[in-house]
Image (cartoon, rainbow, N blue to C red):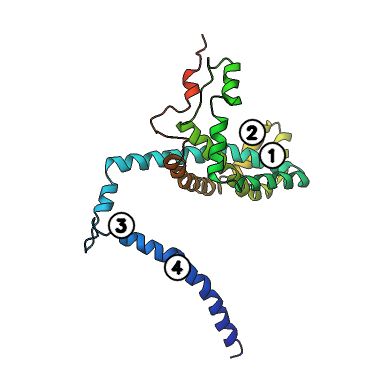
Amino acid sequence: MGNEPTSRFSLLLLSVPMLAIAGLVVVPLALILHTSLTPAGGEAGWTFANYQRFTTSIFMRQVVFSVALAAVVAVLTLVLAVPLASILVRLRRSWQSVWLIYILAQLSLSEVLIAFAWQILLSGTSGFAKFLVWAGLVETASASVPSLGAVVIALTYMSIPFAVLVLFPVMSRLDPSIGEAARTFGATPLRAFVSRECHELCVSGPVHAGFRYGHALKRSPNMIANWFLAANHSLTFLPPFSKLRMAR
């Protein structure tokens, strides 16, 4: 009996976030579902014509493209994030704090700002294009945007901080003596890394890959549909590389 007022107060406190979730999530989703089942022109009744139109070739082509793009970005993100997280774990605590703050600062940047930054970096007057000319890979400097390659680079750049922050706690709990024992028995640093980090991450790896895949799938429509990094899907992957000099 004495706990009854406390229980009522707890239910009252829980009702506030539940009402917020219902108003901000459930109601909008219900309205979207109602709109998707409403016939064209606002006529009365229900129809699945909108969902049938989704299965046409023009929509399915875009779905396949988005899924493939997200898969490529997820793989590239994990390939780059796993070594970075491994290096970060081996640093001193003070340097770990500095790099973690730097990674968190990257997350504060908006997608529009990142897109503008990569547009400048991949432009024809940037250091990237001039480096290709200096290295003799291309004859003249040209912009790499808009292109599919620019979208992949920008999406991978945005996904790496999330992946490192997710992998860092997992890799910090790994036993370093396993890698040391592998090197003691003659294993190369690369093989010791694969046998320690990659083997231990086999269980959680699919979870991280799925998380990165979903993140890339969410970000890709903004990059492709609204931004200037990829004005046309049929553009070459990276225009400067299409002019690379072939070695004789």
Quarter residue 181 falls in: top right
Residue that extends furthest to the left in the rendered view of this protein: 44
Instruction: Specify which label sits upstream in the sequence, 4 or 3.
Output: 4
The answer to whether marks 3 and 1 mark residues whose Cβ atoms lie closer than 8 Å is no
Q: Which mark is residue 23?
A: 4
From the image, state whether disc 1 or disc 2 is nearer to you: 1
Give the amino acid type for the residue marked by disc 3 in the picture. Ser
Q: Are marks 1 and 2 in contact (CB under 8 Å)?
A: no
Few, some or many residues within 10 Å of mark 2 (<14, 14–19, 20+): some
Q: Which residue is mark 2?
A: 191
Helix, strand or loop for disc 1: helix
How far apart in space, not on screen, are marks 1 and 2 (Cα)?
15 Å
* Side (left or right) of 172 relative to 64: right
Going by the numbered disc 1, the residue's amino acid type is: Ile
Q: In what element is the residue under mark 3?
A: helix
Q: Which mark is residue 36?
A: 3
**What is the CA distance from the residue labelled 1 to the residue labelled 4?**
44 Å
Identity of the residue drawn at 64% across and 33% down: 191
Whether residue 22 can be seen here: yes
Of callouts 4 and 2, the N-terminal one = 4
Give residue 100's position: percent from left, percent from top.
69, 47
On the image, the x and y values in percent for residue 124 come to 54, 24
Query: How many labels sit on residues?
Result: 4
The answer to whether 148 is drawn above or below residue 242 in the figure is below
The label shown at residue 87 is 1
Amino acid type, residue under disc 2 in the picture: Arg
